[in-house]
Amino acid sequence: MFKLKQTILMLCLVLSGALCYANTKIEKDEQPVPIELKESTGVSSSDKSNAIIPFINGHVLVVAFSENLGQVSVEVATVAGASVQCLSVLTPNGLQVYIPNAGNYIVTITLSNGDVYAGEFTVTD
């Protein structure tokens, strides 16, 4: 009886881990936002744009970080320069920003070492 109970508990543990596996695949209605290094202080040793994964899904901008980049500042602004939202977050956590109006926007990510990454995207209705 003890072996059966132990086997069932182990099965539940394995299945819960499998169900919690994060899927980072971009769905068909989500569009990736290209990010590139805009300004570097020269302090950084490598380009970290591959660790920043932004995509737009309708009116929601999602920015995920695949590695620890320390504390970063994220600003979303219109192409004309009007700020929509400015936040500071610890990585490797991600964030979501709701953008109420359709139009062209820029997301700017500033790392703690001064490197600035930016990407332009469009929100459509």
Image: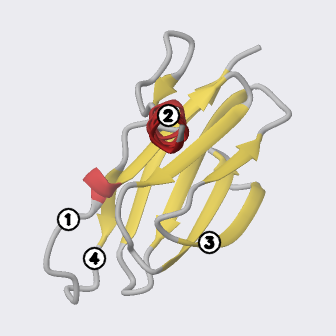
Tag 4: residue type? Answer: Ser
Q: Residue furthest right?
A: 100
Q: Alpha-carbon neighbours of circle 2 within 10 Å: few (<14), some, or many (≥20)?
A: few
Tag shown at residue 2: none
Structural distance between the alpha carbons of marks 2 and 3: 46 Å
Q: Which residue is mark 3?
A: 89
Tag 4: Cα neighbours inside 10 Å, few (<14), some, or many (≥20)?
A: some
* SS at circle 4: loop
Q: Position of residue 68 (x, y in %)?
A: 38, 72
Answer above or below: position of 29 versus 30.
above
Marks 4/1 in contact by CB < 8 Å: the verdict is no
- Residue 96, percent from left and from top: 69, 47
Q: Nearer the viewer, mark 3 or mark 1?
A: 3
Residue toward you, 3 or 103: 3
Residue 47: numbered disc: 1
Q: CA distance from mark 1 to mark 2?
A: 52 Å
Label 4, label 1: how many angstroms apart (C-alpha)?
9 Å
- Name the residue located 62 percent from the left edge and 72 percent from the top edge: 89
Dot placed on the residue nearer the N-terminal end, 3 or 4: 4
Q: Which residue is mark 4?
A: 40
Give the CA distance from mark 3 to mark 1: 20 Å
Q: Amino acid at mark 2?
A: Leu
Quarter holding residue 57:
top right
Occupied quadrant, residue 113: bottom left
In whole angstroms, how far apart are the C-alphas of marks 4 and 2?
Answer: 59 Å
